[in-house]
Image: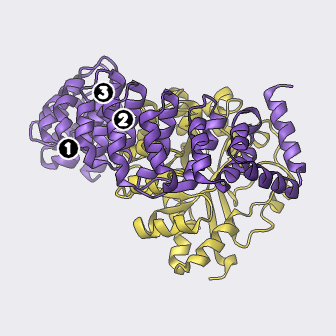
Chain colours: A purple, B yellow
Amino acid sequence: MDAEDAKQTLVRLHERLSREVAGTVADELVRLGPEALKLLLSFPEPLVLAASRHWIVAIALRMKREEAIPILLEGLSHPDWRIFQVARDTYAKMGTDGRDALVENLKSCDVVGGRKQTLYCLHRLADPFGPLAIGDRTLIAPIAEAAASDASEEVRAMAVEVLSRSEAHDAEDTIAGALEDASESVRLEAAKAAGRLGLKKAVGALVEMLDHTQAEVRADVIYSLDRIGEVKSASAVRGRLDDEDWYVRWAAAKALENLWEPENVAALKRAAEDKNPVVAVAAVETLARKAPKEAGDTLAKAAKSSNESIRTTARHYAGG
Amino acid sequence: MPDHDIEIIDTHVHAQPSLTDGDVEPDPKWFRDLFANCRHRTRLLVSCDAGADVLMKRGNVAMVRAVARLVRAFPDKLVGTMMLNPCDIDDALEAMELGVKELGMRCVGELCQYIHNYRTDGPEVVAVVQKAIDLDVAVLFHSGADRHVEGVAHIAAKFPRARIMMAHCGGSRCWRRGIETVRRLPNVSLEVMRGMTEQIGALMDTVGPRRITYGTDFFLHEAPELRYERGNWLLDCLKELKLKDADIERICSGNAKELLKLED
């Protein structure tokens, strides 16, 4: 029997399972307490079925918190997704009841995967626009501590991301610090986080990252500078209009709209001749939106382009 | 307004391979029965399936043709949209040209980054969105996670002339983040997937009735017992919210008609 056959068999059995029996078994497992929960979280295979996972979550929630929580924390460190997902889902249903244990686990768990799953749970509690809509601000400090000092670069990078996706403007110093982290993966995550939070103090470090060897990173950094909107970075971004990669040139042509200064005009007029039409359209559009009086000759030329995108864009902004 | 006077345009329907493979047209009785339980008039914006055995195997142009053939069989109920794999960008752009100019397609999408393995706002997508603007059609993005929402917002901000629909309101679990991320972007409409009263209420409060569409991810397949009942769910939800008739009309079909440039 392969995995899919086993799953289908489980589905068939589940469909035939009497609700009364399932309820009685659940009552008995709750009575037996934490050892029973530990046993349930020891065999991942049956938990491939969502209904089985939901059943265990319901059982865990009926147990005393102080008895269930240590076992669920162990579950977060389990390498199999079927186990750690049950633990995560239980924490989500607990809401803030599980908060203190999670904070402690973020510091004390010695398994990297366990700390990452703990961050996942804390994100749900910290994000005001997350699934639970709680927005617990007291969690920003412990997550920031993990971002700054966890031994694992994976955990530090994830903590940086969680902060930036939790509206953690009070952790700006941590994000700025992460831009100087020894690990490149943390620095790159911090670059994106700086953009999400509009972190002006990150501009200098971001400009230095514009020379990164990977085009995707250069484009991400440009987008972060674009989101931050500090005009002092315009010159560096203009320099990327000559990048070898067209997606980077496109990102630069678009970013200059938010990084507007008069020097952008000449650079965008040159970019309007870019060999890639998507870049040329971006340059024409940015110029037309920010400097309509100076865009006339560029629009007139673009309106006669052999490329349909360039032509229609020019005509749109020329009002024709 | 009585329910039977309301039209619901479901902007997110996939036809399963049984309906897009081969040359046999679906049974008209099956199709009629599909809508037997609807309390309302109905149109479905339909694309193909995105899976490995369909779009990735047969290619964009072939699947746009296949969906167009299905739509032609039921033109009063179906409207075509082009699910594309932009990783094959030349084929994708050719499919768009063909689909819009010759086969009457009204939209690009659902663009499924998680299936075809590209970034929501990656270079492949940039070229597709620019083409959609050129062809004056809307774009429907799959969105089921924070990073998807962020990518949709990036594209929408950089292409203010694009008409963008964000599927699943950003994600079944992360719809609040979805709303927050795109609420200042007037060219993004948010697709409500189920009749979720709380979600629609939040959308009414933040982006208003002009940016809400209804798209359910309904899988169309030729099973005799299959019934489209999701429009009824929406009507129940809108009644619970006690919305004005004009707002109900917008959410059910008015916004979709504007985005897709459809006539009554």
Q: Residue at x 48, y 44 (%)?
A: A102
Q: Which callout, 3 or 2, points at the residue further toward the start of the chain?
A: 2
User: Which residue in the rendered view is the most extreme toward the bottom?
Assistant: B1
CA–CA distance in space, label 3 to label 2: 15 Å
Q: Secondary structure at mark 2?
A: helix
Which three-letter amino acid code belongs to the residue tagged 1? Gly
Residue A104 position (above or below residue B92): below
Q: Residues within 10 Å of mark 2 (few under 14, many from 20)?
A: many
Secondary structure category for the residue under label 1: loop
| Marks 2/1: CA–CA distance | 28 Å
Q: Is residue A44 above or below residue B100?
A: above
Q: Quadrant of residue B76?
A: bottom right
Sequence-first tag of 1 and 3: 3
Q: Position of residue A273 (x, y in %)?
A: 24, 29
**Depicted B94 relative to depicted A168: above or below:** above
Q: Position of residue A307 (x, y in %)?
A: 36, 33
Is residue B218 visible in the rendered image? The answer is: no
Q: Quadrant of the N terminus of chain A?
A: top right
**How crowded is the residue under tag 3: few (<14 C-alpha within 10 Å), some, or many (20+)?**
many
Say whether mark 1 and mark 2 are on the same chain.
yes
* Residue placed under numbered mark 1 in the picture: A229
Between disc 3 and disc 2, the foreground one is 2
Q: Tags 1 and 3 in contact by the CB under 8 Å rule?
A: no
Residue B16: x and y in percent read 74, 43
Question: For the image shown, how many numbered marks are present on the structure?
Answer: 3
Q: Mark 2 against mark 1, which lies toward the viewer?
A: 2
- The answer to whether residue A104 of the structure is visible from this angle is yes
Which residue appears at 33% of the width and 21% of the height? A183
Residue where numbered disc 3 is placed: A187
